[in-house]
Amino acid sequence: MQKIALIREGKTPPDRRVALTPKQCKEVLDKYKLTDKDFEILVQPSPVRCFSEEEYEKAGCRITEDINEASILLGVKEVPKPQLIPNKTYLFFSHTIKKQPYNRDLLEKIIEKNVRLIDYEVLTNEAGHRVIAFGRYAGIVGAYNGILTYGKRFGLFDLKSANACFDMDEMWNEFEKVKLPNIKIAVTGGGRVAKGSVEVLEGMKIKEVSPEDYLNHEYDEAVFTRLRSKDYHFKKGKTKENKEFDLKDFYNNAGSYESHFSDFTQKTDLLIAAAYWNPKSPVLFTKEEMKQTNFKIKVIADITCDIEGSIPSTSRPSTIAEPFYDYNVETESEEKPFSDGKNITVMAVDNLPCELPRNASKDFGRELIDQVLPYLLFEDNPYYLKKHNFTDGKRIARATVTKDKDLTAEFEYLRDYLEGQ
């Protein structure tokens, strides 16, 4: 069996998350040493990782700068090009599969060094659903930051930042400070991110109402609603009374639909944007719509953080250190946060799970152990996989972006991107 290593995160700013916690490493070692007594987990030292080297050492890992003995290297974010070790299997979020221009040279170097890249973002089951992600914590921290922003903007309460909390339990204790007036909060999306956001709102005892009631009723307390694509999209040329929406068709032909989110902008005080956005889809609203007097939204927590995407006020990602900026609807420009009551305040941190690294790592590691490691460690042993009911024999192959100094067939669509065309 192959040895695995937890690499030191090298991207700037540094990421404190890790693929496996110390307790999970002990679980993996206890399980797989029964199969191979030489199985090991190596851990590169890191000054920023959310768990200490001592914790990993106590769990039975070997702390070492030199990880050449390991054939499988586990990271989280992109690995800087000089740190790539040739002829290894790497798992990390490469941010290349959507042809991100800023990482083209990274993919080029991965191929040059004969790295087999398995990208977490495309690890799916046979139904095409992702089996490992940090999305829940993006939603949790994003919603928390949205409430924090609203409280700060209107001088209602002052929450400790999630990043300043030791873990989610400490952040949860902050909920007691939240005292909201009878505002309306809209959450877009139905996936992991949106569900994480709803966890926070429910934890704050904010009442959920249906989209219809949200639009047609007033309340004497803060409420929120969950909005799926069907709630604010319908076929072009149709009226509200004769609207059409088909989810499968929307996924395949998003350009043939239009947004009617303006119904909700007139009723919403705080928007938590947690829906995946296809660039072919209509934007939620336009810059011109934001100038209208009936546009009520004052705070936007843009968890999706698509620059110049579904939310036009998101002109750039913000940072954990400086999470807010204002958008002046008249000049269509960024201003200092909380600088003018006419502005809209934006929270657009693009690495939200990093604010709760211990919890995020724990959930991620659980999925790695249950959904990925057996297939990875025993990909050449179909007997073991079958015996233990791991039936998705192509799981690793589907997520393998590069192998043998080339793109795999699954990712041939990246050829023009790789060649700089």
Image (cartoon, helix red, strand yellow):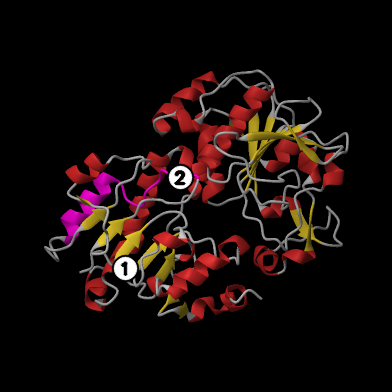
Q: Which mark is residue 14?
A: 2
Mark 1 — residue? 376
Magenta residues, start to end: 13-32
Q: Position of residue 75 (x, y in %)?
A: 38, 56
Question: What's under tag 2, amino acid-wise?
Answer: Pro
Q: Type of residue at label 1? A: Leu
Q: Is residue 96 above or below residue 197?
A: below
Residue drawn at 69 percent across, 51 percent down: 307
Task: Identify the element where label 2 is drawn.
Answer: loop
Q: Is residue 153 visible?
A: yes
Rendered view: 210 above or below 207: below
Q: Is residue 239 above or below residue 137?
A: below
- Separation (CA) of disc 1 from disc 2: 27 Å
Q: Does the magenta segment cover residue 344?
A: no
| Mark 1 neighbour density, 10 Å: few (under 14) some (14–19) many (20 or more) | some
The single residue placed furthest to the front in the displayed view is 82
